[in-house]
Amino acid sequence: HCRSSLWHCVVVDSSDSLRSSKLTTMAKKNNNIIRIDNYDEEARPLTHPSRTSSTTEPSTTKQKKTGRNNKLLHFLVGITIFGAVIVYHGKDNLSMMGSSRIKKLRTSSPDADDNDVAAQIPKCAEHTFLTLYERQPQQPRGDDVVEEKTTTTNINSSCKGMLLRDDIILTTHECSQSTTLFFESTRGSRVFLEATPHTALNANMGLHSKLGFLQVKDAPWHYLFLDQSVRRARMFLSLRSHPDIADVADDDDYNNSNKGGGSSSSSSSGGSTRGSISPYITCKGYRPIVHNFPLPNGAMVPIGEELLTVGLPNENILWEHADLDTAPALRNDDTNERWWTNAITFEEGEATFQKYFDAPEINGPEGSLSIVRAHDGFIGKASGVCESFDPRGHRGEACFYNYVARWRDQKPFSGMHFFDWLDYGTGRSLFERNKKKNFLPDLNDDMVGQIPDEGCVKKKFNSRTVHFFNDTERQEHEIYLSPSEDGQQVIARYKQSDEVVGPSSHDHPHLYMFDLNKQMYIVDKNLWDKENYGAIKHTAVLAGRPALSAGEAYFKKDGVIWGINYSSGHYRPKVTAVTMMYQWMEDQGLNTSAFNWVARKQWSTKDCYETDWKSFEIHAFDVRVLEKTCREVTKSPTWTFKDD
């Protein structure tokens, strides 16, 4: 009877002597001072000395007399014993309990030691049950600048909180009103992050609610997926306010600590153990389940009653009754952190990729080149997209082919989005388990789907990333074209420095990109810092965005162009790309026969007739003249071919 954390378990003096066998649930465990008017009526909590409330009845309320075997009762004060409040009054009632029954008393004073609460937090929640610190500014100096102290020696611990999600902290109502709070991050380093009142969620709390929310300011995203932030769920919310004996911690740490006949009764961190129950948080495996929130006065607020109708976000806020058995578990091997996420179906996982395929900013206008248009089939398209939007640094496309294929082949499906599965689910060590040799060939553009699984082990795969340009870096490689003095040659110069582009060899031409705004970028491979940035890829220059053309350019001395080809495994240009570049140069009055147009062998004038030019949505060109331009370039005297 006394395990309930939702109600006080009260011993009622219903006759001349204390009848300890008569127990009844009398009052919500929100206050620790109880007045009992009648054995048969619900007890009404008195106002706690540290609080004021217009809803509590005054202590002068007349007490009612009851029938046989009942008598007028005086004010009864409860003490908490193992999560239950035992109410006693007068004489030697406490002695009747027997000292052997009272093994641990927890004070209900508002000044209670924080260690009492922390001692009842199981190990599965030791990284999500937070100590919050109130920031104390220094005294203003002569310039009236207030500096913020953020070291543990200069701030006062005052509140507790539960990290429900990376950006949402549950705390008491009083603490949720503080303008600046810090909590200690657990992402592998000890830092303080600022938390502020969560205006939206607090507005939905009841007028007399004892709980509130903080929003972590600038909380690091788990990652961005299709420009949408992904958060990590850190705890499960429970509708059950009174955990039972089946809810004790049962994680691997406990099991390992008791191997070999050990009989340790608690985890090394002082967490929940077999045979004892935390009234606040319990564990199922490594999954922390929140039942109640402890108040400073020792009382507990049931989570389910308070939060079910608050309007919490649907994404990655997890509930015990709905998600505990289905939410996929994720783990960061580097920091040993664990978290959980909403389970998805296989169809939902593929639909997320399809959003990439259909997004205009990724797919580009009709007639353009893109990493989506360049590939056939779901796996090929997804592999190209993954490199460009990989949250862990744009790992090479080639091995993504292998991982996407294995993610789709899961039986049963893991319930995880691809990147969760890849880095924090079973995909994080998939190929290592079956590795035969540590071999990884160079990831050339044309090797998509041709690298064996053992060549894509995660350690090697993670180390082969593509450096994507920011706007500043991209501008450094922007060029403009101009005719030579005699008009017989075309010269390329960098816009920022006005220096000519350096020479290249026939075997190692420079890389170029031609964007939707008809801006051309050249990356001199002789100057590229491969040691620090890895091999240069076409996706790097425009950060995976659509383009008009992509390939390589051959240069002689003094910036003179010898030839331009259209070799790019990421973008795979068609004859339309040559056409638009040719038209661009003609519009500038350049000699288009001054250098070689190095085409693919299968391209011909026939492609010009078969292309639906009217469907093009490239605003930089008049599509009515492109078909004519296409026939002109494919019949040019400098039209040459390159082996595919």
Image (cartoon, grey):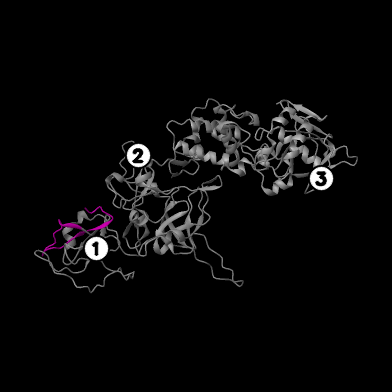
Determine crowd level at label 3: few under 14, some 14-19, many 20+ residues with C-alpha closer than 10 A: few
Q: Nearer the viewer, residue 319 or 192?
A: 319
The numbered mark, 2 or 1, whose residue comes first in the sequence reads 1
**Which residues are drawn in magenta?**
1-24
Name the image quarter holding residue 560: top right
The amino acid at mark 3 is Glu
Against 100, residue 452 (above or below) is above
Reading the image, the residue beneath label 1 is 78
Residue 472, position as x, y percentages in the image: 70, 49
Instruction: Tell me the CA gap for discs 3 and 1.
Output: 85 Å
Q: Is residue 387 magenta?
A: no
Residue 499, position as x, y percentages in the image: 81, 45
The amino acid at mark 1 is Gly
Name the image quarter holding residue 371: top right
Asked if residue 454 lies left or right of residue 320, the reply is: right
Question: From this viewpoint, which residue is outermost toward the bottom?
Answer: 60
Reading the image, the residue beneath label 2 is 255
Determine crowd level at label 2: few under 14, some 14-19, many 20+ residues with C-alpha closer than 10 A: few
Name the image quarter holding residue 363: top right
Reading the image, the residue beneath label 3 is 499
The numbered mark, 3 or 1, whose residue comes first in the sequence reads 1
